[in-house]
Each structure stands twice: as structure tokens, then as C-alpha cells.
Amino acid sequence: MVEDRVDFLDRLIALLTDHGVRYCVVGGQAVNAYAEPVVSLDLDVAVAADQLGQVEALLRQAFSVEGFPHSLNVSVPGSALRVQVQTDPRYAAFVDRAEVRDVLGLRLPVAGLKDVLQGKVWAVTDDTRRPSKRQKDLADIARLLEGYPALRAQVPAEVLARLV
């Protein structure tokens, strides 16, 4: 689904695995692991808090890394895949509750369903995010609630009111 002529995803996962990094997929690809998938070029990853410094150093040795306030954006020429490592400490706790699921054709640790929803609630209520990104986050919440209606109680009323 994603043009990746240089095996970026496989190389990234191998780097994390070979160095014993505890991580999980979050964001839109995590939603795809629980709901009907939609196409995305993004892969958001959370890592264990105590390994974030190590992960940044490893990634900088192997790939292009650009730091932002709440993420490290990782890329490599020849791949359309965009990887963001979350540096927001709220996501680190998701790693311990992750479960293995299918993501981009691989079996990867994915944040638990309630954690994926929580991350999307944080994203959709973050006024610093671009409006278009927040609309996608809202759609991701809707996709999760369609498949798991019992999770509505976890979504703030102001977010529920914005759902179609």
C-alpha cells in the first residue's frame, strides 16, 4: 500500500527489535488494526519512556530524523512511509498494554483498543493540531465507535457532539 523501495519499515522494525526496544503502534495505523482500514502513509509509534533517548540515538544513526515538540519524524529517501515516534510521555504507558495485531502486513505490537481511542481523543482536542488532522482524528474515533459502541462512555461529550 505504501511505496517503500528501500524496505524502510522492515529496517525500522528490525532496528527496534534487535535492540530490545519496547514499542507499540499508535495513531491511525493502530485504528486500522481494530477497524476497517483506510489508506495512510503515516506510522505512529510510542516507545517505553526509559528507552526514548536510546531510540532517538539509534534512529539518527540509521535514518533521517527531525525533532518536533511532541514527536521525532523519521524518514529515508526511497520510501513514502512517514514514521513519527511520539515523545509525549502520555503515550509511553500504552507500550505495556499493547497486543500483537496486523499492521501494514506485519504482526506488530499495537496499543490496546482503549489506549488507541484515548490517543485519538487527545489528538482531536489538541488545538495546536491542524484542523485537517483533527478532522481525520474525529473520523478515526467514529470508526472505532462503529465497531466498539461500548467505548462511547470513554469519549468526552464535546467530542461526541462533533461526530456525524
Image: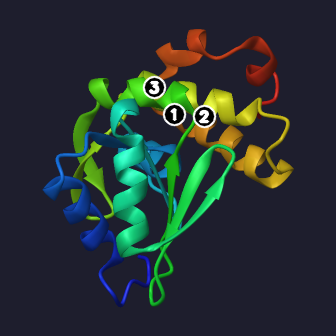
Quadrant (top left/top right/bottom left/bottom right) for the C terminus: top right
Residue at 53 percent of width and 25 percent of height: 90
The alpha-carbon separation of the residues under discs 3 and 1 comes to 12 Å
Residue where numbered disc 3 is placed: 115
Q: Are marks 2 and 1 in contact (CB under 8 Å)?
A: yes
> Which-is-in-front pick, marks 2 and 1?
2
Q: Are marks 3 and 1 in contact (CB under 8 Å)?
A: no
- Specify the label residue 120 is tagged with: 2
Observer-nearest residue: 115 or 64? 64
- Specify the label residue 153 is tagged with: none
Q: Is residue 87 left or right of residue 132?
A: left
Q: Earlier in the sequence, mark 2 or mark 3?
A: 3
Furthest residue to the top? Answer: 153
Percent across and percent down for residue 89 are 53, 29
Q: Is residue 113 left or right of residue 38?
A: left
Observer-nearest residue: 157 or 112? 112
Q: Are marks 2 and 3 in contact (CB under 8 Å)?
A: no
The amino acid beneath tag 1 is Leu
Residue where numbered disc 1 is placed: 144
The alpha-carbon separation of the residues under discs 2 and 3 comes to 9 Å
Q: Earlier in the sequence, mark 3 or mark 1?
A: 3
Residue at 58 percent of width and 34 percent of height: 88
Q: Earlier in the sequence, mark 2 or mark 1?
A: 2
Is residue 66 something that shows in the picture? yes
Colouring chosen for the image of the structure: rainbow
Residue at 77 percent of width and 33 percent of height: 126
Residue at 31 percent of width and 42 percent of height: 23
Is residue 145 something that shows in the picture? no
For disc 2, the neighbor class at 10 Å (few under 14, some 14 to 19, many from 20) is many
